[in-house]
Image (tube, rainbow, N blue to C red):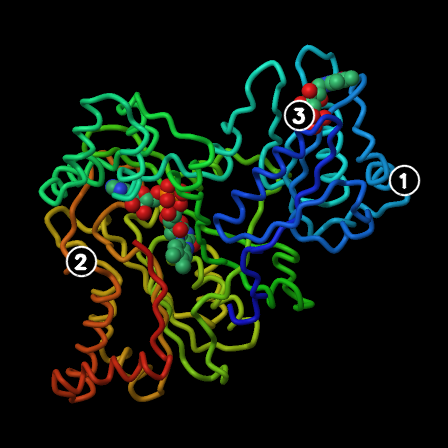
Amino acid sequence: MSDIVHDDHPRTLTILFATETGTAQEIADRVAMQCRRIHVQARILSMDSYSPAELISEKMVIFSVATTGSGKEPRAMSRLWNMLLRSDLPEDLFEDLSFAVFGLGDTAYEKFCWPAKLLSRRLASLGATEISARGEGDEQHPLGFAWLLCTYLDISAVPRRSFFAMLRHFVSDKLEEEKLDEFLSPEGADELYDYCQKPRRTIREVLEEFRSARIPREYIFDVFPILRPRQFSIASSMKAGFYSAFCLRHPRQIHLCIAIVRYKTMLKVPRRGVCTDYLVHLKPGDRLPIGLQKGLFALPPDTATPIICVGPGTGAAPMRSIIEERTFLGSIANTLYFGCRSAHKDQHYATEWEAYVVAGSLTYRPAFSRDEPEGAPRRYVQDLIREDSKRTWELLGVQRGWIYISGYQVLSCPFENVLTKTIHCSSANKMPAGVKAAIMHAAQTEGAKTKEQAQDFVWMLEREGRLVEECWS
Ligand SMILES: Cc1cc2nc3c(=O)[nH]c(=O)nc-3n(C[C@H](O)[C@H](O)[C@H](O)COP(=O)(O)OP(=O)(O)OC[C@H]3O[C@@H](n4cnc5c(N)ncnc54)[C@H](O)[C@@H]3O)c2cc1C
Ligand SMILES: Cc1cc2nc3c(=O)[nH]c(=O)nc-3n(C[C@H](O)[C@H](O)[C@H](O)COP(=O)(O)O)c2cc1C
């Protein structure tokens, strides 16, 4: 929605280390170097030359903390640690702070990595958000990058050609070298596609096959892609949530409507979405790092302007926030086209839509593709819009209404459920294109436009910002 704060991921961070014999500093230096590679500016400081008060205004800090005599913190950490232990600190002091802690210790000691553990616990109790599980380096084992791999790098991604080009430098087995040379040759492009993209083979699986690969630490960030953030539309109105005296529906909450990504590849290997699988395993009270990004949808300035929301499946998410906000603002000129397989299975927010209908503030048009009788063609949102041509033209052509489109681009593929096979869909099934074709149909049949004029009409809606789509594949 338009009034969401724009807050991109911070591109700067502070790395604080506390060392006795230099290892924690070495780790901090390495993290800083990797940050520079990915164009994140890192300020690196020993904790004893850092003013503890500064921590309050930090956005993101990585701590690298050694352990000394009987689980004590290194001397460099004492000043900061004593400040953090003060009992008069408010619980939300570090509300804006995201942090990660890497502890260094030795499992031969009873209190392994104690200061790192205590630090992460204390920061969390003061409102800070731990953006990744605490890392622990054990002197008994070589300090690995497993933590980094699991936390920041995406080894579940389907690798690009550039990954194979990098990998080629680090394999030593003759057959593996030849295979990679083949993949990377101009003639090998199809073979690489069949090996990798088509079966959606992941980096982890590729590495299991190219077993001679030894990737030096300093190249880790060149070889492996960084875990990228996933986007989800906000399904609740901030305004309706915060300000209404009568409908404090969700104060200080953000609602999401998320389809859990699960499917099987053509090689019958089960796959889970990286982010949605992580979300599934969250427990109430867990904290997670998020960022807010301004969406494409904005409301018409005049609440009397009619709007049409087209949001099948999880495309209902932004529509729910739009409709909540519009009804909160007193508008009744709202139409929603929602689509799902069955009225009884995946009709998100059905009771809320019904309540709006009863209150007279929503025209609700659901399409249930699998509830049609045997043999009958499946109906999708674009089919309903086509059926409603008269009303569609009245709202968009005559009353100069706005239309929003959101959701998976391809409707006839059951992407939103557990898939047993990969399905290839023709572009004719694309939902946004189908919706635009239905609008053109309305312009032709009800607005007496020629085909070319109807196309111009849709382009005009887009140019004027009255037709906005936010879809994903
Ligand atoms: C602006 C925007 C808003 C969005 N809003 C929402 C929302 O409100 N709700 C929502 O649920 N999603 C939304 N999405 C989509 C969501 O971001 C993606 O589904 C996301 O990739 C899920 O993350 P993941 O890590 O769980 O899956 P990933 O690990 O990223 O896996 C997803 C990928 O798996 C592949 N895949 C998935 N199914 C199959 C299949 N059957 N066959 C072959 N390959 C497949 C595709 O390549 C897909 O890109 C939005 C996307 C955008 C861009
Ligand atoms: C005197 C001494 C005491 C230590 N006590 C602990 C301890 O109680 N718990 C622990 O996990 N590690 C302990 N260690 C191990 C160090 O934390 C570990 O070697 C670490 O890598 C050192 O990091 P640094 O070089 O940054 O100081 C101790 C090491 C020394 C030399």
- Residue 429's mark? 2
| Residue that appears at 74% across and 56% down | 57
Please state the quadrant of the image where ligand 2 appears: top right
Residue 189 as seen in the image, left or right of residue 70: left
Above-or-below relation of 385 to 411: below
Q: Furthest residue to the top?
A: 108
| Observer-nearest of 228 and 368 | 228
Judging from the image, what secondary structure is the residue with disc 3 in? strand
- Give amino acid for label 1: Ser
Judging from the image, what secondary structure is the residue with disc 2 in? helix
Say which of marks 3 and 1 sits in front: 3
Could you tell me if the residues under marks 3 and 2 are in contact, i.e. CB atoms within 8 Å?
Answer: no
Above-or-below relation of 150 to 185: above
Q: Is mark 3 within 8 Å of ligand 2?
A: yes
Which is nearer the N-term, disc 3 or disc 2?
Answer: 3
Residue 52, image x and y in percent? 82, 47
- Residue 87's mark? 1
Above-or-below relation of 296 to 56: below
Quote the CA–CA distance across marks 3 and 2. 55 Å
| Residue that appears at 33% across and 60% down | 471
- Residue 280's mark? none
Say which of marks 1 and 2 sits in front: 1
| Observer-nearest of 454 and 82 | 82
How crowded pointer 2 is (Cα within 10 Å; few <14, some 14-19, many 20+) is rated as some
Q: Which residue is mark 3?
A: 104
Residue 196 as seen in the image, left or right of residue 285: left
Quote the CA–CA distance across marks 1 and 2. 61 Å
- Give amino acid for label 2: Asn
Quote the CA–CA distance across marks 3 and 1. 27 Å
